[in-house]
Image (cartoon, grey):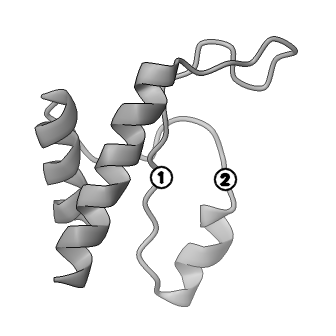
Amino acid sequence: LVAATHQAILLVSGVETRLSTAGGTSDGRFIAPTGAQVLELGPLNATIHQVDECVGVDDLDRLSKMYELILQALLT
């Protein structure tokens, strides 16, 4: 999962990623103890959890392509 995600991000955005546990919290903290791999991937968002929260359409398109590539890598 990590390798597939790293590759998808690199191919779609050209960004070299690194693993990090910094940032906000999510329900992933409840899933990880089951032994399942947990990875969070979403758009950057300067207005997250605010009244005017929004995401650019281009960011959604890139994220969709990343998800598609990740699924292809995992299912083939």
The earlier-in-sequence mark between 2 and 1 is: 2
> How far across and how far down the image is residue 6, in percent?
19, 51
For residue 24, above or below residue 40: above
Query: Hey, which quadrant is residue 71 in on the image?
Result: bottom left
Q: Position of residue 17 (x, y in %)?
A: 21, 38
Q: Which mark is residue 69?
A: none
Quadrant housing residue 53: top right
The answer to whether residue 58 is left or right of residue 45 is: left
Which quadrant is the C terminus positioned in? bottom left
Element at label 1: loop
Q: Which mark is residue 40?
A: 1
Q: Secondary structure at mark 2?
A: loop
Where residue 33 sits, quadrant-wise, is bottom right
> Which residue shows up at 54% across the image and 35% down it?
23
Q: Split into 4 quadrants, where in the image is the N terminus?
A: bottom left
Q: Which mark is residue 26?
A: 2
**Any part of residue 20 in sight:** no
Q: Please indicate whether residue 13 sits to the left or right of residue 38 in the image.
A: left
Does residue 40 appear to the left or right of 45 in the view shown?
left
Q: Amino acid at mark 2?
A: Ser
Rendered residue at 20%/29% (across/down): 13
Q: Are marks 2 and 1 in contact (CB under 8 Å)?
A: yes
